Amino acid sequence: MIIERTIEAVLILTAIRAGIRLLARKRAVTSEELDLEKELRGLAPAKRLPIAALALLVLLTVGALAEVIWPGTLNVLRNDPSNPDWWRPLTAPFVQDDGVIGAIFNLVTAAAVMALAEWYWGGLLALGIWATGAWAPVGAVAALAGYRVAAANTDAYTAGSSGATYFTAATLCAALLCAGTGRDRLIGLVGPVIGVISWLVLGDGHGLLFTAGVIVGVALWVIVHLIGRLSRGSGAGKLAPRAPTSSTGGGSDRESSSGQ
Protein backbone atom coordinates (compact mmCIF):
# COMPACT_ATOMS: atom_id res chain seq x y z
CA MET A 1 0.00 0.00 0.00
CA ILE A 2 2.83 2.42 0.83
CA ILE A 3 4.50 1.70 -2.53
CA GLU A 4 1.25 2.31 -4.37
CA ARG A 5 0.56 5.58 -2.58
CA THR A 6 4.12 6.78 -3.24
CA ILE A 7 3.85 5.97 -6.93
CA GLU A 8 0.46 7.68 -7.10
CA ALA A 9 1.93 10.83 -5.55
CA VAL A 10 4.86 10.80 -7.98
CA LEU A 11 2.44 10.25 -10.86
CA ILE A 12 0.22 13.22 -10.01
CA LEU A 13 3.19 15.52 -9.30
CA THR A 14 4.73 14.54 -12.64
CA ALA A 15 1.47 15.38 -14.41
CA ILE A 16 1.22 18.75 -12.65
CA ARG A 17 4.80 19.54 -13.70
CA ALA A 18 3.91 18.58 -17.26
CA GLY A 19 0.87 20.85 -17.16
CA ILE A 20 2.93 23.82 -15.95
CA ARG A 21 5.49 23.19 -18.66
CA LEU A 22 2.76 22.85 -21.27
CA LEU A 23 1.27 26.22 -20.38
CA ALA A 24 4.70 27.85 -20.31
CA ARG A 25 5.30 26.66 -23.87
CA LYS A 26 1.85 27.81 -24.94
CA ARG A 27 2.53 31.35 -23.74
CA ALA A 28 6.16 31.26 -24.84
CA VAL A 29 7.32 32.01 -21.26
CA THR A 30 10.31 29.77 -21.91
CA SER A 31 11.46 27.72 -24.86
CA GLU A 32 13.58 24.66 -24.12
CA GLU A 33 14.81 26.09 -20.81
CA LEU A 34 13.47 24.20 -17.78
CA ASP A 35 12.99 26.77 -15.05
CA LEU A 36 9.98 26.08 -12.83
CA GLU A 37 10.24 29.36 -10.90
CA LYS A 38 10.40 31.40 -14.10
CA GLU A 39 7.50 29.46 -15.60
CA LEU A 40 5.29 30.04 -12.56
CA ARG A 41 6.15 33.75 -12.38
CA GLY A 42 5.40 34.12 -16.07
CA LEU A 43 2.08 32.30 -15.90
CA ALA A 44 0.60 33.79 -12.75
CA PRO A 45 -0.19 37.33 -13.98
CA ALA A 46 -1.56 36.16 -17.32
CA LYS A 47 -4.07 33.54 -16.22
CA ARG A 48 -7.72 34.20 -15.53
CA LEU A 49 -9.51 32.78 -12.52
CA PRO A 50 -10.22 29.06 -13.16
CA ILE A 51 -13.98 29.18 -12.61
CA ALA A 52 -14.66 25.55 -13.54
CA ALA A 53 -11.89 24.30 -11.25
CA LEU A 54 -13.18 26.41 -8.36
CA ALA A 55 -16.76 25.18 -8.90
CA LEU A 56 -15.58 21.58 -8.81
CA LEU A 57 -13.50 22.25 -5.70
CA VAL A 58 -16.57 23.69 -3.96
CA LEU A 59 -18.60 20.54 -4.73
CA LEU A 60 -15.81 18.27 -3.50
CA THR A 61 -15.36 20.35 -0.35
CA VAL A 62 -19.10 20.21 0.38
CA GLY A 63 -18.99 16.43 0.05
CA ALA A 64 -15.99 16.14 2.37
CA LEU A 65 -17.53 18.43 4.98
CA ALA A 66 -20.80 16.50 4.81
CA GLU A 67 -18.90 13.36 5.80
CA VAL A 68 -17.54 15.16 8.86
CA ILE A 69 -20.91 16.60 9.90
CA TRP A 70 -22.99 13.51 9.04
CA PRO A 71 -20.87 10.36 9.48
CA GLY A 72 -23.31 8.25 7.43
CA THR A 73 -22.85 10.34 4.29
CA LEU A 74 -20.18 8.09 2.77
CA ASN A 75 -22.28 4.94 3.08
CA VAL A 76 -25.29 6.67 1.53
CA LEU A 77 -23.46 8.23 -1.43
CA ARG A 78 -20.68 5.76 -2.28
CA ASN A 79 -21.04 3.38 -5.21
CA ASP A 80 -22.13 0.08 -3.67
CA PRO A 81 -22.60 -2.70 -6.27
CA SER A 82 -24.84 -4.59 -3.84
CA ASN A 83 -27.17 -1.60 -3.46
CA PRO A 84 -29.36 -0.59 -6.44
CA ASP A 85 -29.82 3.06 -5.43
CA TRP A 86 -29.71 5.01 -8.70
CA TRP A 87 -27.83 8.02 -7.38
CA ARG A 88 -24.77 6.19 -6.04
CA PRO A 89 -22.72 6.10 -9.27
CA LEU A 90 -23.38 9.84 -9.70
CA THR A 91 -22.52 10.93 -6.16
CA ALA A 92 -19.56 8.57 -5.50
CA PRO A 93 -16.88 10.92 -6.94
CA PHE A 94 -17.93 13.69 -4.55
CA VAL A 95 -17.28 11.78 -1.31
CA GLN A 96 -13.88 10.57 -0.12
CA ASP A 97 -13.14 7.17 1.42
CA ASP A 98 -9.50 7.47 2.45
CA GLY A 99 -9.66 9.43 5.70
CA VAL A 100 -8.83 13.07 6.39
CA ILE A 101 -5.34 13.03 4.86
CA GLY A 102 -6.62 11.26 1.76
CA ALA A 103 -9.48 13.74 1.42
CA ILE A 104 -7.14 16.73 1.70
CA PHE A 105 -4.78 15.21 -0.88
CA ASN A 106 -7.66 14.54 -3.26
CA LEU A 107 -9.05 18.07 -2.96
CA VAL A 108 -5.68 19.79 -3.37
CA THR A 109 -4.66 17.70 -6.37
CA ALA A 110 -8.10 18.08 -7.97
CA ALA A 111 -7.88 21.87 -7.68
CA ALA A 112 -4.34 22.01 -9.12
CA VAL A 113 -4.97 19.60 -11.97
CA MET A 114 -8.32 21.12 -12.92
CA ALA A 115 -6.89 24.65 -12.95
CA LEU A 116 -4.10 23.57 -15.30
CA ALA A 117 -6.54 21.63 -17.47
CA GLU A 118 -8.93 24.57 -17.64
CA TRP A 119 -6.16 26.98 -18.63
CA TYR A 120 -5.02 24.64 -21.38
CA TRP A 121 -8.16 22.88 -22.65
CA GLY A 122 -10.77 25.46 -21.63
CA GLY A 123 -13.36 25.24 -18.85
CA LEU A 124 -16.08 23.19 -20.56
CA LEU A 125 -13.68 20.69 -22.09
CA ALA A 126 -11.79 20.31 -18.80
CA LEU A 127 -15.05 19.56 -16.97
CA GLY A 128 -15.99 17.09 -19.70
CA ILE A 129 -12.65 15.32 -19.27
CA TRP A 130 -13.07 15.15 -15.49
CA ALA A 131 -16.64 13.86 -15.85
CA THR A 132 -15.46 11.18 -18.26
CA GLY A 133 -12.87 10.02 -15.77
CA ALA A 134 -15.49 10.05 -13.00
CA TRP A 135 -18.30 8.17 -14.75
CA ALA A 136 -17.05 6.42 -17.89
CA PRO A 137 -16.82 2.60 -17.49
CA VAL A 138 -13.07 2.54 -18.07
CA GLY A 139 -12.57 -0.59 -15.97
CA ALA A 140 -15.29 -2.45 -17.84
CA VAL A 141 -13.73 -1.57 -21.20
CA ALA A 142 -10.30 -2.71 -20.00
CA ALA A 143 -11.83 -5.96 -18.75
CA LEU A 144 -13.05 -6.72 -22.29
CA ALA A 145 -9.40 -6.76 -23.36
CA GLY A 146 -8.57 -9.25 -20.61
CA TYR A 147 -7.04 -6.82 -18.12
CA ARG A 148 -7.99 -6.80 -14.49
CA VAL A 149 -7.37 -4.50 -11.54
CA ALA A 150 -6.58 -6.28 -8.27
CA ALA A 151 -9.78 -7.30 -6.51
CA ALA A 152 -8.79 -5.55 -3.29
CA ASN A 153 -8.32 -2.28 -5.16
CA THR A 154 -11.53 -2.70 -7.12
CA ASP A 155 -13.50 -3.02 -3.88
CA ALA A 156 -11.81 0.08 -2.49
CA TYR A 157 -12.64 2.31 -5.47
CA THR A 158 -16.28 2.86 -4.58
CA ALA A 159 -15.88 6.56 -3.77
CA GLY A 160 -13.45 9.41 -4.23
CA SER A 161 -12.45 11.98 -6.83
CA SER A 162 -8.90 10.73 -7.35
CA GLY A 163 -9.72 8.56 -10.37
CA ALA A 164 -11.20 11.48 -12.30
CA THR A 165 -8.29 13.69 -11.26
CA TYR A 166 -5.68 11.19 -12.49
CA PHE A 167 -7.60 10.79 -15.75
CA THR A 168 -7.59 14.57 -16.26
CA ALA A 169 -3.94 14.89 -15.27
CA ALA A 170 -3.02 12.29 -17.87
CA THR A 171 -4.39 14.48 -20.67
CA LEU A 172 -1.84 17.15 -19.72
CA CYS A 173 1.01 14.66 -20.07
CA ALA A 174 -0.44 13.51 -23.38
CA ALA A 175 -0.66 17.08 -24.70
CA LEU A 176 2.95 17.83 -23.72
CA LEU A 177 4.04 14.55 -25.29
CA CYS A 178 2.37 15.61 -28.56
CA ALA A 179 3.29 19.30 -28.51
CA GLY A 180 6.71 19.20 -26.91
CA THR A 181 10.17 18.54 -28.27
CA GLY A 182 13.32 17.19 -26.68
CA ARG A 183 13.24 17.35 -22.88
CA ASP A 184 9.61 18.48 -22.83
CA ARG A 185 8.59 15.31 -24.62
CA LEU A 186 10.52 13.27 -22.07
CA ILE A 187 8.65 15.03 -19.25
CA GLY A 188 5.37 14.19 -20.97
CA LEU A 189 6.45 10.56 -21.36
CA VAL A 190 7.32 9.96 -17.69
CA GLY A 191 3.69 10.03 -16.55
CA PRO A 192 2.35 7.49 -19.07
CA VAL A 193 5.22 5.09 -18.31
CA ILE A 194 4.56 5.27 -14.56
CA GLY A 195 0.82 4.91 -15.19
CA VAL A 196 1.23 1.71 -17.20
CA ILE A 197 3.57 0.24 -14.58
CA SER A 198 1.16 1.21 -11.80
CA TRP A 199 -1.69 -0.50 -13.61
CA LEU A 200 -0.13 -3.64 -15.08
CA VAL A 201 2.48 -4.39 -12.41
CA LEU A 202 0.76 -3.18 -9.22
CA GLY A 203 -2.84 -3.62 -10.35
CA ASP A 204 -3.61 -0.05 -9.25
CA GLY A 205 -6.83 1.42 -10.66
CA HIS A 206 -5.30 4.89 -10.71
CA GLY A 207 -2.77 3.62 -13.24
CA LEU A 208 -5.59 2.23 -15.36
CA LEU A 209 -7.43 5.55 -15.37
CA PHE A 210 -4.20 7.45 -16.05
CA THR A 211 -3.45 5.23 -19.03
CA ALA A 212 -6.95 5.76 -20.39
CA GLY A 213 -6.54 9.50 -19.87
CA VAL A 214 -3.35 9.50 -21.94
CA ILE A 215 -5.19 7.87 -24.84
CA VAL A 216 -8.04 10.37 -24.59
CA GLY A 217 -5.57 13.27 -24.26
CA VAL A 218 -3.71 12.32 -27.43
CA ALA A 219 -7.00 12.04 -29.33
CA LEU A 220 -8.17 15.42 -28.01
CA TRP A 221 -4.88 17.11 -28.89
CA VAL A 222 -5.07 15.82 -32.45
CA ILE A 223 -8.72 16.87 -32.84
CA VAL A 224 -8.22 20.33 -31.32
CA HIS A 225 -5.17 21.05 -33.46
CA LEU A 226 -6.83 19.71 -36.59
CA ILE A 227 -9.83 21.99 -36.00
CA GLY A 228 -7.47 24.89 -35.32
CA ARG A 229 -5.63 24.35 -38.59
CA LEU A 230 -8.88 24.10 -40.54
CA SER A 231 -10.16 27.29 -38.91
CA ARG A 232 -6.96 29.17 -39.67
CA GLY A 233 -7.05 27.91 -43.23
CA SER A 234 -10.63 29.04 -43.83
CA GLY A 235 -9.93 32.36 -42.11
CA ALA A 236 -6.91 32.99 -44.31
CA GLY A 237 -9.01 32.28 -47.38
CA LYS A 238 -11.61 34.85 -46.36
CA LEU A 239 -9.02 37.49 -45.57
CA ALA A 240 -6.97 36.94 -48.73
CA PRO A 241 -7.16 40.03 -51.00
CA ARG A 242 -8.89 39.62 -54.28
CA ALA A 243 -6.84 39.99 -57.42
CA PRO A 244 -7.43 43.44 -58.95
CA THR A 245 -9.65 43.43 -62.00
CA SER A 246 -7.82 44.60 -65.05
CA SER A 247 -9.22 47.80 -66.52
CA THR A 248 -6.84 48.00 -69.46
CA GLY A 249 -9.42 46.99 -71.98
CA GLY A 250 -12.00 49.42 -70.62
CA GLY A 251 -9.46 52.24 -70.60
CA SER A 252 -8.52 51.56 -74.20
CA ASP A 253 -12.14 51.67 -75.21
CA ARG A 254 -12.64 54.96 -73.46
CA GLU A 255 -9.50 56.36 -74.99
CA SER A 256 -10.52 55.26 -78.45
CA SER A 257 -13.98 56.71 -77.91
CA SER A 258 -12.58 60.04 -76.83
CA GLY A 259 -10.18 59.99 -79.73
CA GLN A 260 -13.06 59.55 -82.09
Image (tube, grey):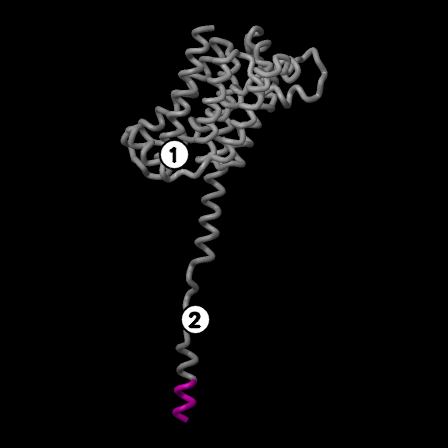
Element under label 1?
Answer: helix
Residue 124 versus residue 201 in the image, above or below: below
Across and down, in percent, residue 26 comes to 37, 37
Residue topped by disc 1: 23
- Tell me if mark 2 has few (under 14), some (14-19) or many (20+) residues whose alpha carbon lies within 10 angstroms of its own: few
Front residue of 195/147: it is 195
Q: Residue at x 36, y 32 (%)?
A: 180
Q: Residue 245 — which label?
A: 2
Q: Name the residue rendered at 45%, 48% in the picture.
A: 232
Q: Residues within 10 Å of mark 1 (few under 14, many from 20)?
A: many
Mark-to-mark CA distance, 2 and 1:
46 Å
Q: Earlier in the sequence, mark 2 or mark 1?
A: 1
Q: Residue 55: horizontal and vertical position, in percent?
A: 53, 31
The amino acid on which the numbered mark 1 sits, given as a three-letter code, is: Leu
Indicate the quadrant where residue 18 lies: top left
Where residue 79 sits in the image (x, y, percent)? 64, 16
Q: Which quadrant of the rendered structure holds the C terminus?
A: bottom left
> Residue 12's spot in the image, x, y percent?
43, 20
- Where residue 92 sits, quadrant-wise, is top right
Magenta segment includes 223: no
Q: Residue at x 56, y 32 (%)?
A: 128
Q: Residue at x 66, y 15 (%)?
A: 76
Q: Is residue 257 visible?
A: yes
Q: Which mark is residue 7?
A: none
Task: Give the residues in magenta.
Answer: 254-260
Which type of secondary structure does the marked residue at label 2 adopt?
loop
Q: Which three-letter amino acid code belongs to the residue tagged 2?
A: Thr
